[in-house]
């Protein structure tokens, strides 16, 4: 198995050099401009299509109801991404792609396919059912998977594992479901306007209950399977080309199959929908939630396992691997910095935590022979970013480590302590929390004499 390069032992700047000349179409502002233009045009077209089908009043009602589950879903995926948070621009792109580009592709392709089936088969009445159970899952999951593929190809440094795939796929599907719910809820409102439906008996209320209350996670659940496939592919070695192709395809096929099964539940009898929901959708949601949360915990263990070597090499303090491997300690470090130095210091600590986590994951991949050709360059860049922020972040993380280290049962010595004489067997064991120990205040932006207490011992007690 390939081994990663040795740990750098002294601070150094990232390698320099003159930037390579790029053609005009390779420049960042050109690519961003083209992407924003594409998404904006898609948004305008989808807006016109939905408004034409629902009417202005129906569109506004659908918009107001469809937006309700969006903040909760985005917050859930952002929570999953807290160990190594990706940039907001990736999430913004994913949501915009799902709400605009993917929704437009789905509406146009599904309408065309349904009309073609109705005019070319002997059973036009079954065109809607066939379109919902066969055509829609293929078209919609492929359109949503395109966003995951684009981030995987062009934002490779931000796409390092299963959690990244789940987050990008889930946010894309949240955007898609948002636009689709506007269409369904707006259409239902229009139906109620024509038939006079009111209260809980209205079509709008029933549609809202099924799509927003019961199954807001449906589209994210399907597309997350595609994201898991891309995430496992991201963990594969660069020479495992077949694995990196087949795993995303397998995830996409599973997403299509689950989507088709869910759409076809209405054809399974009067209670088919509720049977599929209770016996299949809810357990699948619980299983995938457990998988993602356990993966998140495994990422924290990776941070605690990989960073001590950098502490031994002098880049980190001995306390930092422990603190960076605990979400509670990270939060306490940001709060400590904010309380003493303000919002900017808390932001600096958050950046430091993100860079340190990326460094741990990079070294973990390197130890497994999957570091890539730019391993050394990327490692030096991350170390340089840490070194720039160390004076603000390290004291805060040391403080958080002291506050969160578990208590240790320590037996008192058999000699007198603080003037009290114990028996021949000494004092009984007692628990001492690290916060009770004597620690000198850290040096630097927080004042005091940082580092004067020597190497960090999370179980250090009073002498």
Image: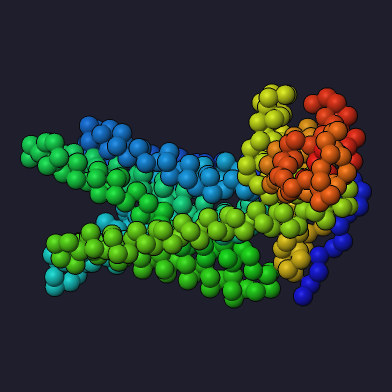
Note whether residue 462 is visible: yes
Note whether residue 318 is visible: no
Q: Nearer the viewer, residue 249 or 38?
A: 249
Question: In the image, is residue 441 above or below residue 254?
Answer: above
Give the quarter of the figure containing the N terminus.
bottom right
Question: In the image, is residue 98 above or below residue 438?
Answer: below
Q: How many marks?
A: 0
Q: Is residue 210 left or right of residue 366?
A: left
Horizontal and vertical percent for residue 53?
23, 43
Horizontal and vertical percent for residue 375?
78, 59
Give the quarter of the figure containing the C terminus.
top right
Q: Residue drawn 68% across and 27% down? A: 338
In the orientation shown, which residue stands out farthest toward the front?
423
**Which image quarter: residue 432?**
top right
Q: Nearer the viewer, residue 52 or 222?
A: 222
**Which image quarter: residue 317?**
top right
Horizontal and vertical percent for residue 54?
22, 40
Q: Is residue 217 left or right of residue 17?
A: left
Q: Residue drawn 62% across and 48% down? A: 83
Question: In the image, is residue 304 above or below residue 196?
Answer: below
Q: Residue drawn 36% across and 68% down? A: 257
């Amino acid at each position: 198995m390939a081994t990663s390069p040795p740990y750098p032992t002294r601070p150094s700047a990232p390698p320099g050099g003159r930037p390579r000349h790029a053609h005009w179409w390779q420049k960042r502002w050109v690519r961003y401009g083209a992407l924003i233009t594409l998404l904006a045009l898609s948004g305008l077209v989808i807006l016109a299509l939905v408004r034409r089908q629902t009417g202005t009043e129906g569109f506004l009602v659908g918009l107001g109801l469809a937006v309700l589950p969006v903040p909760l879903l985005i917050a859930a995926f952002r929570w999953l991404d807290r160990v190594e948070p990706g940039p907001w621009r990736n999430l913004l792109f994913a949501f915009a792609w799902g709400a605009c580009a993917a929704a437009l592709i789905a509406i146009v392709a599904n309408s065309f396919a349904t009309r073609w089936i109705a005019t070319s088969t002997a059973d036009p009445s079954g065109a809607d059912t066939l379109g919902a159970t066969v055509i829609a899952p293929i078209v919609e999951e492929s359109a949503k998977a395109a966003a995951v593929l684009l981030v995987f190809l062009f934002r490779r440094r931000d796409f390092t594992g299963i959690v990244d795939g789940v987050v990008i796929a889930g946010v894309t599907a949240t955007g898609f479901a948002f636009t689709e719910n506007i269409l369904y809820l707006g259409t239902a409102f229009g139906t109620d306007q024509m038939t006079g439906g009111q209260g809980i008996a209205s079509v709008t209320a029933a549609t809202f209950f099924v799509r927003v209350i019961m199954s807001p996670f449906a589209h994210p659940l399907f597309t997350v399977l595609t994201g898991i496939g891309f995430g496992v592919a991201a963990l594969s070695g660069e020479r495992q080309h077949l694995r990196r192709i087949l795993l995303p395809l397998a995830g996409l096929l599973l997403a299509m199959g689950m989507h088709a099964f869910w759409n076809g539940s209405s054809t399974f009898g009067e209670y088919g929908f509720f049977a599929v929901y209770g016996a299949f959708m809810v357990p699948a949601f619980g299983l995938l939630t457990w998988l993602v949360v356990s993966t998140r915990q495994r990422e924290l263990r990776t941070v605690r396992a990989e960073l001590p070597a950098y502490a031994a090499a002098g880049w980190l303090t001995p306390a930092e691997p422990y603190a960076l491997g605990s979400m509670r300690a990270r939060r306490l470090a940001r709060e400590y910095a904010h309380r003493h130095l303000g919002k900017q210091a808390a932001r600096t600590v958050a950046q430091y935590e993100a860079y340190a986590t990326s460094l741990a994951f990079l070294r973990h991949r390197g130890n497994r022979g999957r570091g890539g050709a730019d391993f050394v360059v990327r490692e030096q860049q991350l170390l340089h970013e840490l070194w720039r922020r160390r004076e603000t972040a390290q004291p805060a993380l040391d403080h958080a480590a002291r506050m969160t280290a578990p208590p240790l049962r320590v037996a008192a010595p058999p000699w007198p302590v603080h003037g009290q004489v114990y028996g021949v067997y000494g004092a009984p064991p007692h628990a001492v929390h690290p916060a009770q120990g004597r620690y000198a205040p850290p040096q630097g932006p927080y004042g005091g004499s940082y580092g004067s207490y020597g190497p960090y011992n999370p179980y250090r007690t009073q002498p």
